[in-house]
Amino acid sequence: MAVTIHDVAKLAGVNSSTVSRVINGKATITPDTKERVYAAMRELDYHPNSLARSLASGLSGAIGVVVDARDAEAFSNWFFGRSLFAIEKVAQARGYQVIIANGAQSKGGNIETLMKEHKVDGLILPPTTVKPALMEAIGDFPYVVLGTPDTLRGDTSWVDNNNEQGAEMAVRHLQEMAYSNIAYLGGYQKRGFTKRRVKGYQRTNTGRETILATDGTSENAYAVAMEALKQPEHPDAFVCNDNLAAFGLLKACRALKLDVPNDVGIVAFDNYPLAEYTDPQLTIIDIDTAMLGEQTAQLLFRRIENKVGNQQIMLSTTLVKRASTERKAR
Amino acid sequence: MAVTIHDVAKLAGVNSSTVSRVINGKATITPDTKERVYAAMRELDYHPNSLARSLASGLSGAIGVVVDARDAEAFSNWFFGRSLFAIEKVAQARGYQVIIANGAQSKGGNIETLMKEHKVDGLILPPTTVKPALMEAIGDFPYVVLGTPDTLRGDTSWVDNNNEQGAEMAVRHLQEMAYSNIAYLGGYQKRGFTKRRVKGYQRTNTGRETILATDGTSENAYAVAMEALKQPEHPDAFVCNDNLAAFGLLKACRALKLDVPNDVGIVAFDNYPLAEYTDPQLTIIDIDTAMLGEQTAQLLFRRIENKVGNQQIMLSTTLVKRASTERKAR
DNA sequence: GCATGTCATGCAACCGTTTGCACAATCATT
DNA sequence: AATGATTGTGCAAACGGTTGCATGACATGC
């Protein structure tokens, strides 16, 4: 049916192994022969069967990106999307396919299937999946965690943005803008990245310490912020765990007729596409998700190809100053 | 190295073909034999090599989801994410892998590679990739377009939400709420789905027809809306092409001290997670992206497996009434 | 001018399954 | 009891490549 390497070989008057070598370019071939082979491939519109190739070479030519999607939102999460885009780009450049898999499946069997059935040559995992059982099953199979695993171990590869440093930068910026009573708003406090951000906040904050946890929704952030802002000596600035918390906070300020940035300063993590459309625009601790994805993929390929040891990469965040902290002289 | 089907066969005292048949369950096997084979598989922790399986069966066990991502945003696009999640779910249930690919590559060569090198058994394509050249290359290879191809042809499979009906519903709702001067705001007018929405608007609208195109950004929507609202007989209601346009419009209303919903009514397409956090909350023409993805995947598998002919599926949108059209009696 | 080395290519085994065909054993029919 | 149908399993040939080893041609060194 389909045209095989043998058909090409016959037409070019060479052996199929020669054709294979021409395709893979990992052997010295006479320019003349090479030309004849290429001509034959062109004439027959030959496309190597990647399945056969994989079987023979033992490499699937794909990497798996696991998403811990308990609900549909996780996939729509822009953090994931941006990273995925960058990962795909790196993979594409190497001729690799990207397989996405929902890791929230029954007992992580899905992830193991991916590696044990040779469907992928490497895995990109979310921190939440990094548990002893999986780690044991994974052995020395190449993988990189996108984020910091809660159980920190040296023999793990991960790439993450520096959440502590980000929170520190947020607090310092607010201090520079002469805010003195800085609170931290939002975040399920159990999540590792939230903990690290809070840690950075605590270390840098010099005024009263106020940590306002929420259930992660904007509505809850609104309710929590309302209560906090009604207190007599309420915070005059907030570091928000994400944009949703900031939206809730903005709404609360509007409701209480508090001016942002003059009465209340706001810095939020994550640069949502909408962060610059709020009123006022939000000052942001920007996470370079594209870079995060790129670095993750590149580390994974290094692990797959060169067999380098485990590495940990920490990326800095950047401060994007916008109106929500641009205090007028008072 | 790895344990193969032959190892299992030897341990179970049968031929490897018997093991294969047990695995695939497509032959009658003595319960006793079956049990011995399962025991051997368990003992050896056997996992079939999907690569070999694919080669022998001629099926890759994967479907490709192509995204037309000119920039990083497309991947973070909420619409895409939700659909992808649903697609993955359906594929997962069938033991299929989902490969994502950026279709905006040089001359669509990427898509062709996916099918010609047997990397996938079927494709889900965005409408923008549906062009004669690709269609010719694709031949009778199974595929489904997620959206309506601009070049409508009967011999194409696609799944889309009914944009015309959605726009009609939006206009009718505004009419019921006693708005009389309804405009359409937003959207690159060249995109197919925008055209269809505008058509629905035009067909249903009984008052003056006002179509305000934008470049798709919230900022531009703000500028365009500002200008429109400053006119003496400005529209008292808008159907927005997406949430971003609505955000720009909301900002314009705030700037001009126009009350939403009393002075201006707003209905927007697409239920962004943030649509219910705006002030006031947005009335929405909701697109069931999860259903869209599910139907698309299911149609694709029907095409792959049963060889049914091309089909077109149109899903209805739903109206989610919120505050932005909830006019007080005046 | 002969031993040695390098280069280009062929040969054939192998990657780990699936599957058509063959055949022996068992069962049903008359 | 003989015959035919059915059932369970083995054998071996694919599936379409890759790759270690062998070989012949030619260049190099002394």
Image: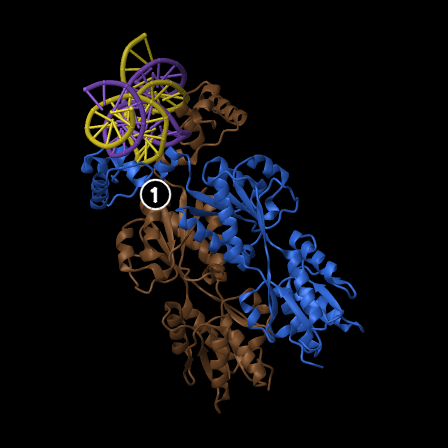
Chain colours: A blue, B brown, C purple, D yellow
Which of B28 and B43 lies nearest the eye of the viewer? B43
A87 left or right of A182?
Answer: left
Which of A320 and D3 lies nearest the eye of the viewer? A320
Vertical order, B299 against A53 (above or below): below
Tell me the residue at 45%/32% (across/down). Answer: B48
Vertical order, A144 against B50 (above or below): below
- Residue B116 location in percent, x, y? 31, 46
- Residue B203 location in percent, x, y? 38, 77
Amino acid type of the residue that numbered disc 1 sits on in the rendered structure: His
Q: Which residue is label 1 attached to?
A: B118
Tell me the residue at 47%/28% (across/down). Answer: B2
Vertical order, B266 against A36 (above or below): below
> Where, by quadrant of the figure, is residue A10 drawn?
top left
Query: Residue B235, can we see it?
Result: no
Vertical order, A234 against A300 (above or below): below
> Where, by quadrant of the figure, is residue B150 drawn?
bottom left
* Callout 1: chain: B
Tell me the residue at 81%/74% (across/down). Answer: A232
- Residue A78 location in percent, x, y? 53, 59
Which of A168 and B151 lies nearest the eye of the viewer? A168
Q: Quadrant for the C terminus of chain B, please.
A: bottom right
Q: How many marks?
A: 1
In the orientation shown, which residue stands out farthest toward the right?
A: A232
- Residue A320 location in percent, x, y? 59, 68
Query: Residue B203, can we see it?
Result: yes
> Dot 1 lies on which element?
loop
Label 1 packing within 10 angstroms: few (<14), some (14-19), many (20+): many
Which of A5 and B170 lies nearest the eye of the viewer? A5
B118 left or right of A203?
Answer: left
D1 left or right of A148?
Answer: left
In the orientation shown, which residue stands out farthest toward the bottom?
A: B232
